[in-house]
C-alpha cells in the first residue's frame, strides 16, 4: 500500500496480505492513499508464524533498517504505528511538528511543548475539563502561516 501524509509519500509492503487490515489501523492521522507507487520511504513487514519445528519472527524494516523483531505480531504493529508517526513528524514537507500538547481556548491555540512524560497529556486533560477544545496530546502541527492543526 502507498499513501501520503503531510507531504511525505510512504509505501508499506507485507509478506502476508491477511495482515493488511491490521496495518491499515496503524496508519497515521492525515494518511491518504496515493495513486502513484513512488515513495519517499518504504516499510517492509515480514510476517512470521509457526512452522514445522520452528517459530519465525515478525520483522519490520524501514528501508534497510530493522525497526522491530518479535514473535508477537501485535507488538511489531505497535512499533509500526509509533514509527510511522515519528517518521512523518520528522519528514513532513507541508507542516512543522512540535512535540507538544495542544488545546483550543477562546479561538486561540495553547501549545504546551515538552519532553515525553513531562505532563503534557495531564495538562491537556485538565484544560479539557475546564472547557478547552482538544487538538492533540502528542504533536502541535503547524502550517506555513503558523496555524495549528489537530493531530489525534
Image (cartoon, rainbow, N blue to C red):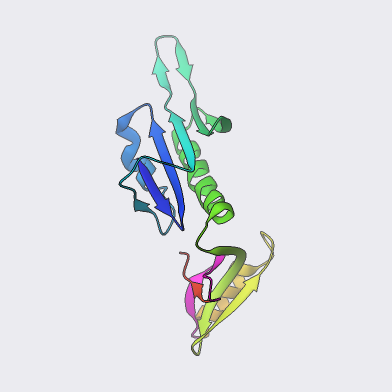
Magenta extent? 131-146
- Position of the N terminus, as image quadrant, is top left
Residue toward you, 116 or 6:
6
| Vertical position of residue 103 compared to residue 6: above or below | below
Q: Can residue 138 be seen in this view?
A: no
Q: Where is residue 80 in the image (x, y as percent from the top left)?
A: 49, 42
The image quadrant that residue 50 belongs to is top left
What is the count of numbered marks?
Answer: 0
| Residue 99 highlighted magenta (yes or no) | no
- Position of the C terminus, as image quadrant, is bottom left
Q: Is residue 55 visible?
A: yes
Residue in the image at 52% along x and 57% along y: 93
Residue in the image at 57% along x and 31% along y: 66
Q: Where is residue 150 in the image (x, y as percent from the top left)?
A: 46, 69
Q: Position of residue 110 (x, y in %)?
A: 58, 80
Residue toward you, 87 or 115:
87
| Vertical position of residue 88 compared to residue 71: above or below | below
Q: Which residue lies furthest to the top in this view?
A: 53
Q: Where is residue 39 in the image (x, y as percent from the top left)?
A: 44, 42
Amino acid at each position: 500500500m502507498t499513501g501520503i501524509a503531510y507531504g511525505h509519500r510512504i509505501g508499506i509492503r507485507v509478506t502476508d496480505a491477511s495482515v493488511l487490515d491490521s496495518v491499515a489501523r496503524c496508519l497515521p492521522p492525515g494518511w491518504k492513499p496515493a495513486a502513484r507507487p513512488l515513495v519517499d520511504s518504504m516499510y517492509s513487514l515480514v510476517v512470521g508464524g509457526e512452522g514445522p519445528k520452528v517459530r519465525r519472527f515478525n520483522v519490520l524494516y524501514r528501508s534497510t533498517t530493522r525497526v522491530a523483531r518479535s514473535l508477537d505480531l501485535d507488538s511489531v504493529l505497535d512499533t509500526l504505528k509509533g514509527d510511522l508517526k515519528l517518521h512523518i513528524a520528522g519528514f513532513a514537507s507541508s507542516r512543522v511538528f512540535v512535540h507538544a500538547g495542544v488545546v483550543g481556548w477562546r479561538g486561540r491555540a495553547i501549545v504546551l511543548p515538552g519532553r515525553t512524560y513531562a505532563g503534557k497529556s495531564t495538562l491537556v486533560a485538565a484544560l479539557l475539563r475546564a472547557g478547552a477544545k482538544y487538538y492533540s496530546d502528542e504533536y502541535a502541527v503547524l502550517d506555513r502561516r503558523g496555524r495549528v492543526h489537530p493531530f489525534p
